């Protein structure tokens, strides 16, 4: 009963940390978030993704073939709230809060409090992170499998949740079947129930299995594959520096100045590890399972070229939270002091990091393209070119912010393209959205066309603007007021008059 009473305030704490200023901090949306939200919008409106594929097993997106479950579950929130950052992130926040409740119920209130305030779990619940959804489904499956002796239906349900996690994030295409194999071995005496559960898992995975050998299904792994550093990369995930000191190297995967956990939690990890070692001969099935996951979870990430990517190893962080909770309970006998200390230290750091995230990392969340989309609404009757030399999928941000009619993108896919949908991992260099085209600027032709050109400050220098008679209409600045995107209008007639020998495109202008 005490545990039941403790769980509610822990879930409430988790919800407050995940939902305060939700949808606005982080600012803007990054490309993958926009892709999840817009594809959910497209599925809601048409039953097809942005390319016109009906309910795909993988979302082609930018050629990285995302797992589809997050977008499918986002359809109801887009229906209720409309397409925006709130509705796009809602699934992650809901499942992230559910995860904290699950941890508190399963591993104890102390572990629940740690999960509620840990930077990595708070951060991911505030973004549209497919990995966060997969993490919750995965541990629902694990928790049910460990409790199946109470109700026999728990094991088939467990394998179903483990199967669903594989549809949420790529790493679980490895971790889920490995975990199913683990439970199959430890429960091998219960053969009829194991066979039935395995049938459910395999049946659920049949669409995934059928497409697993297509180029699209493996495009993400192919792009990141680097097994030469396997051992080094694997050990990096157990590095104290990466766990407690340094933020994730990708600014879209962590708070500024905060690592996976707070530095002061390292003491509790040491104490918890000592407790585990002392009780190593009497560990129960739950403890052994968590230790198995702790060491299995980094394997998919270890074969990639990134030395530390938090999204790919989230299950190991839950296992570390459990170990830290053992240390906390051992070192601090008075629980109310423990809770107050954790809350004070954690909330202070989270507040500081949230302020930095909102302002210092606005560009990491493509907020400048939100402002550009708004600026260019005044030019809907003119031809617009948005240079995508450095941000190839910029089109999805415009489609997201403008809630573009899905048919505008779907019409660019031929029947042959859709028939080979899972074999086209190459990115699309050109996209069209109403009056706006997204591609690199062609300096041989674009300056001789009457149009609006938007590019970042590296793509068009002031000298180029003067040379080609580009008239500056405006600019998009960052938080410090520094220009990051510039908008120009071309003047083909003036450009042609400046040439000693007219360029061939000038002839199309007539008497310029």
Image: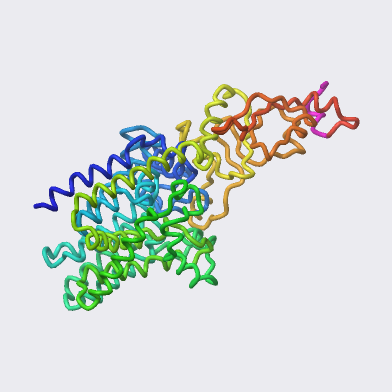
Q: Nearer the viewer, residue 425 or 127?
A: 127
Q: Is residue 417 above or below residue 209?
A: above
Q: Is residue 272 magenta?
A: no
- Labels in figure, total: 0
Q: Nearer the viewer, residue 164 or 18?
A: 18
Question: How far across and how far down the image is residue 511, in percent?
Answer: 83, 21
Q: Can you say which quadrant of the picture contains the C terminus?
A: top right
Residue 384 relative to residue 464: left or right: left
Question: How far across and how far down the image is residue 257, in percent?
Answer: 46, 48
Question: How far across and how far down the image is residue 173, in percent?
Answer: 38, 63
Q: Which residue is at 33% across, 47% downward?
A: 345
Q: Find residue 412 and report its image quarter.
A: top right
Q: Nearer the viewer, residue 333 or 151?
A: 333
Looking at the image, which residue sits at the far right? 500
Q: Which residue is at 46% across, 60% downward?
A: 241
Magenta stretch bounds: 504-512
Residue 51 relative to residue 330: left or right: right
């Amino acid at each position: 009963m005490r545990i039941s009473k403790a769980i509610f305030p822990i879930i409430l704490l988790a919800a407050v940390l995940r939902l305060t200023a939700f949808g606005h901090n982080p600012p803007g949306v990054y490309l993958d978030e926009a892709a999840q939200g817009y594809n959910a919008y497209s599925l809601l409106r048409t039953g097809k993704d942005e390319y016109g594929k009906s309910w795909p097993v993988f979302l082609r997106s930018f050629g990285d073939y995302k797992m589809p479950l997050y977008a499918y579950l986002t359809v109801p929130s887009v229906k209720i709230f409309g397409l925006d950052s709130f509705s796009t992130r809602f699934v992650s926040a809901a499942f992230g809060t559910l995860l904290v409740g699950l941890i508190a119920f399963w591993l104890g209130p102390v572990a629940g409090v740690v999960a509620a305030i840990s930077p990595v779990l708070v951060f991911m619940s505030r973004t549209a992170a497919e990995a966060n959804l997969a993490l919750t489904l995965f541990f629902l499956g694990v928790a049910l499998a460990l409790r199946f002796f109470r109700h026999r239906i728990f094991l088939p349900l467990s394998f179903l949740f483990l199967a669903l996690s594989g549809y949420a994030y790529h790493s679980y295409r490895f971790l889920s079947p490995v975990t199913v194999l683990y439970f199959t071995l430890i429960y091998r005496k219960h053969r009829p129930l194991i066979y039935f559960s395995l049938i459910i898992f395999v049946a659920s995975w049949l669409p995934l299995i059928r497409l697993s050998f297509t180029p699209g299904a493996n495009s993400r792994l192919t792009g990141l594959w680097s097994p030469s550093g396997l051992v080094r990369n694997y050990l990096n995930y157990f590095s104290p520096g990466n766990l407690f000191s340094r933020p994730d190297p990708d600014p879209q995967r962590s708070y500024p100045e905060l690592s996976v956990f707070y530095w002061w939690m390292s003491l509790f990890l040491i104490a918890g590890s000592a407790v585990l070692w002392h009780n190593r001969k009497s560990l129960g099935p739950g403890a052994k399972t968590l230790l198995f996951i702790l060491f299995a979870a980094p394997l998919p990430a270890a074969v990639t070229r990134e030395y530390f990517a938090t999204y790919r190893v989230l299950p190991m962080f839950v296992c570390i939270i459990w170990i830290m909770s053992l240390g906390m309970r051992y070192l601090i006998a008075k629980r109310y002091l423990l809770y107050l200390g954790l809350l004070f230290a954690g909330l202070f750091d989270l507040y500081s990091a949230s302020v930095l995230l909102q302002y210092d990392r606005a560009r990491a969340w493509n907020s400048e393209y939100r402002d550009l989309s708004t600026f260019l609404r005044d030019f809907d009757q003119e031809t617009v070119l948005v240079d995508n030399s450095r941000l190839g999928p910029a089109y999805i941000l415009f489609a997201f912010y403008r809630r573009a009619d899905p048919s505008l993108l779907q019409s660019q896919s031929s029947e042959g393209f859709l028939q080979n949908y899972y074999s086209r991992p190459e990115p699309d260099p050109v996209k069209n959205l109403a009056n706006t085209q997204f591609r690199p600027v062609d300096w041989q032709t674009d300056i001789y066309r009457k149009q609006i050109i938007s590019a970042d400050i590296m793509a068009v220098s002031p000298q180029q603007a003067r040379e080609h008679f580009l008239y500056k209409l405006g600019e998009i600045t960052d938080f410090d007021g520094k220009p990051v995107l510039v908008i120009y209008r071309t003047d083909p007639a003036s450009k042609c008059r400046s040439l000693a020998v007219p360029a061939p495109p000038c002839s199309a202008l007539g008497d310029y």
